[in-house]
Image: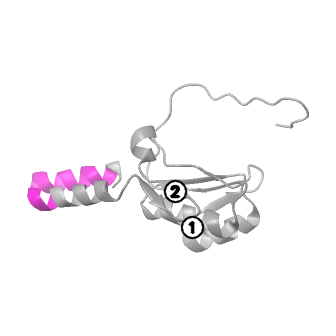
Amino acid sequence: MTEKELNALLDEVRSGRTGTEDAARRVLDAMRAAPFEDLGFARVDSHRHLRQGFPEVILGVGKTPAQIAAIAGSIAGRGHSLLVTRATPEAYAAVRAAVPEAAYHETARTIVASRGEIPAGTGTVLVVCAGTARC
């Protein structure tokens, strides 16, 4: 359950469209969904957005396109925004089958799909390169 969905549910309770017992059951069902979804080859942290403000980010290196698509489908299927880093065009094609609104940014090698508003972060981002790396 996303923050937006929780707020909508609370509005329904306040307006009388949903009873407290039904609301409690829906919240408990969301909590019982477990903080991790085991896909066999990966455990998706489905509660990361609650702790960090943004869902889990998928590192595309070392995963097959099908694995990336399965993880992406799990994340997006819960109504969360999607970010895949170090992605290939083949991974993008697989992700598009699971998340049709996903977009690929070739230069950045990222796959993204925005779901709702993403709160602005605070702090500084630092990109560090060393040796023969090119940024």
Whichever of labels 2 and 1 marks the residue nearer the N terminus, that label is 2
Determine if residue 18 is in view. no
Image-based side of 75 in relation to 128, left or right: left
Q: Main secondary structure of the magenta part?
A: helix
Residue wearing tag 2:
43
The amino acid type found where label 2 is placed reads: Arg
Magenta segment boundaries in residue numbering: 4-23
Task: Identify the secondary structure beneath mark 2.
Answer: strand
Q: Nearer the viewer, residue 16 or 46?
A: 46
Percent across and percent down for residue 14 are 11, 51
Numbered mark located on residue 70 in the image: 1
Image-based side of 104 in relation to 15, left or right: right
Residue drawn where x is 63% and y is 61% of the image: 103
Q: Are marks 2 and 1 in contact (CB under 8 Å)?
A: no
- Quick one: label 2, few (<14), some, or many (20+) residues within 10 Å? few
Q: Nearer the viewer, residue 97 or 130?
A: 130
The amino acid type found where label 1 is placed reads: Ala
